[in-house]
Each structure stands twice: as C-alpha cells, then as structure tokens.
Amino acid sequence: MCGIVGYIGPRDAYPIVIEGLKRLEYRGYDSAGIALYDGTDLKVAKTKGKVSELEKCVENEITKTGNLGIGHTRWATHGVPNDVNSHPHVSNSGDLVIIHNGIIENYESLKKELINRGYTFKSDTDTEVLINLIEEVKKKEKVKLGKAVQIALNQVVGAYAIAVFDKNKPEEVVVARLGSPLAVGIGEDEFFIASDASPFIEYTKNAIYLEDEEMAIIRFHKKIKVRKIKNDAEVPANIQELQLNLEQIEKGGYEHFMLKEIHEQPKAIVDTYRGRLLRDEAIIKMAGIEDNMKKFLNANRIIIVACGTSWHAGLVAEYIFEDLARIPVEVEYASEFRYRNPVITENDVLIAISQSGETADTLAAIKMAKSKGAFVFGVCNVVGSSIARESDAGAYTHAGPEIGVASTKAFTTQITVLSLIALRLARAKGTISSSDFRRYLLEMEMIPNKIEKALESDAHIRVVSDIYKDASNFLYLGRGYNFPVALEGALKLKEISYIHAEGYPAAEMKHGPIALIDENMPIVVIATRAEHYDKVVSNIQEIKSRKGKIIGVITEGDTIVRELADHVIEVPDTIEALSPLLTTIPLQLLSYHIAVMLNKNVDQPRNLAKSVTVE
C-alpha cells in the first residue's frame, strides 16, 4: 500500500522517479505526485488518479529538470483521495518536502499544537502535520534536517516510511522507517529510494533495507549514514546484493501480470521445493526445520497466523499438519489474534505466513507471540523482509516477484512449503510410513507438470466465464482440503471482478446458503475424487433440484459429476492432501477471465493494496 520513490545523483531524476512509480503501481493507490528540485527552486505536481495522469500534470505545470526528486503513490487513509491530499506535502515555509507511507495516530493533537503556533494546513492528511512538525523542531531547536527528523519522529505515534529534503540543502535526503518497508539503492555516486527494490533494479544490485526505528542521511558524493531514531546511535549500513532482475518484474508478453503469474506457478513450485525435496534420497531437507526440530516435535500446538490468501494457505496447512503429523493446529486471522488476548505459551510454535513479509497485523502477531515466549517460524516470499527478520527461523517461498494484487503463485508456493514442513515432521514423528512418504515425494515432484495440464483448460474456462460474467453472485463449495480452496476462489472473484461471492464447506450449504440458490445462481463445486466425494455428489444433486447452475471442478475422467453439472473443468488426479495445488488453478483462471470480460483493472483492483502495511 502506497509507494515511495526517490533519487539523488548526477542523472535526471524525473524519468527515474516516474518509471519507479509505475513499477510500484501494483501496491495499490488512488493518487500520485512528484517533487523535483531543478537547481533553483522546488517544483511539485500531484493529482488524484493514476501515474499516467501525473505525467500529464507534469507536462502542463512544471519542468522535468533536476537531479533530486521524490515521488509517491497514495492509498488514502486520512483525507479523501484528491489533488490536495496527494503527496508530496510541503511545509508552511515552502522549504521542506515529504513523502510518507503509514499512519501518524496522534496527528490531531500535534496539529492542534502546531495551529496554536501559527501553522496553517491545506490538506486533511497526517503527513502535512508531520512535515510541519519537522519544520517547527528544526526552527525551534536550531538543528540540521536529520536531527529535526529524529526529534520529530520521537514525538509521533504510528507507522511510517518517509523521505524528506530541504530545498535549501538539495544535496541531502533524510529517510526513516517504522512499520513500513524502505530500501535505499546504492549506486556509483548516486542513491535511489523506494518501497521495494523494483524501481531501481536496472541501476544497481546493491541496497540497504532499513530496519524498524532506523533513519538514514543520504548525501550526494558521500557515504550513507544509518542511525537509530530513538537514541541517535550510528549503526552499520548493511548492504545486500539484490536477487531480483528486470525480466521478473515485466509482463513477458502476457496481457496482465496476474495471467503471467498464474502461468508461472509450475516453475515457482519447482523453485520452492528445489534443494528441499530430495526424492532419490527419500528426504526433505529444510534448515529452518532441522535446526529447530525439537521445538516442533515438543510443541503443544502450532498456531498459524496470516491474512487474506495467506490465511487460506494456512487453512490447507491445518488439514495436512493434523492429518499427517498429528500436531494440533489453530489458524487465526492475524488482525483478530493480536487483539483478543490469546493464550500463548513457550510450548507453542507460531507459523506466520505473508507473501510480502511486511503485513502489519501479522508482524504485530509475531511480536506478541515472541513476547510470550513462543517460537516463531516465518513463511514469506521476500528476502530481507520484516517478518523474515523478526522470526526465530523460517522458510522462503521462491515464487519470485508477484506484481498482481490478487495473489496466485504466492498461494500455491505457500502450500508447497507448508506441505514439505508437514511431511518432514510426520517422518520425524513416525506418523507416516516410509512407502507413503515416498509416494508423497513422487507426487509433489509431479505437481508442476499436472498444473501445466490444468492450464490447458484455459480456453474452455474462458467460454464458461463468458456465460456467467454477468452474474451478481457466486457460491463456491468444497469439502476437506478443498474447503479453503473454495474460500480462495471466492476471494479471487471478489477482488478483481467485484462480483459478490462466498465460499462455504459443501455440507454447510443446508445451513443457510441453500436459500439463495435459484436458476440465476452459479455454484462452483470442487468435486474431485476424494474421501468425501459421494457426499459432494449429494450436495450437487440438491443444488440441481433447485435449478442452480453448477460449475464442477472434477478429477480427469470423472463421469458422475459430468452428467450432473452444467459445466465441468477437469484437473489431473493427485493425492487428496496435494489437490489444492491443482483445484485452485481453474478458479484463478475463472476469476481472471470474468474480470477481463467486465473490463476491470485485473492487476490493480480498486481499493486494494498488494501489501497491507498499516492497520
């Protein structure tokens, strides 16, 4: 949510900042803005709408010159989306300019105090309060910008990633973070600032990821200095080499990032289990598990915390952990878990799942669990992310960058990692036989090829999508391992097509949702050959008798559901515990094609952000 981009160095800042903002569009936003220092004065342009609208605004209002620039894409929190509330914000004197991700919770009291001191405000934002607070501190304490930022941030409550500069000292930019990610790219006598590395990947492979409560003073032609916000102590600048490359964050010939990422799932799953799943040796090798095996084997229970799609992956994990490893599991929404005073002990293991590794509620849940002595294991996709750093141990998925806001390959790679963990623990506990363990390893190796086979139904799914694209509501049903897939399928359709959809356990249909069923209601039923197959068939017959339109996701070759359903989409046969890796594919494609046919912005759905880094 929101995006920060900045540049200081010998190049023209404008094209770097604008292209960087385009790279961050996937994060979700409603307005955009840019500030440039042209060597003489500060130039600011900002507007409600997309970066393309900002480009038009710049053409009409300001020059594009200057070697210092900052830009922002805003996702509204305080103040409605409009030109005035867009970032950057300038202080009352016109000297200081800021961009800010996050929320300043005590902005109202700070604003009242500043008004009493003669400050005026043009916007409704907390960010304009922050830049004027920095100006007041700088003026009152007679300190340099870096010190003023430090003092001001010690007075605020909330979360932030900021970049600030003073037009009277244009060789310096001050950045800081607490709760919102911020990276600084290190080039040859130049620096890049961004919410993640994608805006500057073609310019440098070296970056510093600020830790929480750290700030950095970036000076042209000088080394970067990183300091603690609370006590001003200098800390080493930990420069990391980026693994990202430009090809990974481009569409590669696909119409949308989401479609590209759906088709990347076979490779992403192989990348995720490569080096971990050693079938010939009949072992699963994961350092984070091996080094902490006793923590897992002696755990009273495993608590899984996550949000959104990651929560659905956690539900799948609950089934497989309890089924194979016989370890009690509870799956919690991180946003609820952190506030309901849960019972956590030092004998609990908490698994935190997050694609970005920056989800605010999940990060808060981790900190709370650690404070109570629980062992925390992180599962995320982004190397060096906050959750990766906060966890006691963990495992990365290797999905590669996921640009589409609606997660696809993140979901399947998370299930892959969690399945590997469950199998490894089951083997260690002796709750799975050697022959069954080998059968699982063989089947996991075959999953990528079976996903490729499932993707061959794309043209057929497009036809089905065209039939139901104008429906007002959808119902998704599944049982056992595929109940979470029903939830995920419904979420995908809601996210990108804005059609109301609900996921339910198939047996719960009779406890309410059956009242909704008529000839206008499409019902997606995951009816693969599994333990509860006959009962799902009975559910389908109940729907059929009430004239509901049935879209069945079935095992290849199934004739029973084919005769009952209005439409069927086949997936290859597999072990039931691994079936979510296949059954989710047609649901992703169904939501994608319906959204495209409805002319929705598939990669950047309204009101949504890729990573929710504030409450």
Image (cartoon, grey):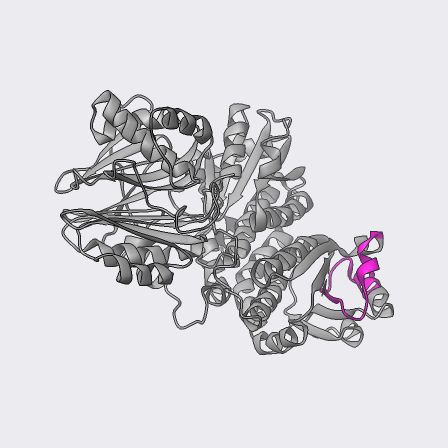
Q: Is residue 389 left or right of residue 188?
A: right
**Residue at (43%, 58%) from the top-left corner?**
403
Q: Nearer the viewer, residue 230 or 110?
A: 110
Is 430 placed above or below 555 here? Answer: above
Residue 520 within the segment the image draws in magenta: yes
Residue drawn at x 36%, y 39% is: 161
Q: Quadrant of residue 48?
A: bottom left
Q: Is 330 situated above or below 231?
A: below
For the image shown, how many numbered marks are present on the structure? 0
Pick whichever, 413 or 33, lies toward us: 33
Q: Residue at x 82, y 53 (%)?
A: 512
At horizontal 57% and vertical 73% (from top left) the residue drawn is 597
Q: Can residue 522 be seen in this snapshot? A: yes
Measured as percent of width and height from the top left, residue 408 is found at 53, 59
495 sits left or right of 232 in the view: right
Rendered location of residue 262, percent (x, y): 51, 65
Asked if residue 577 lies left or right of residue 129, the reply is right
Which of the 4 quarters of the picture holds residue 231? top left
Confirm whether the magenta stretch covers residue 272. no
Residue 206 vs 215, above or below: the answer is below
What span is colored magenta in the figure?
511-540
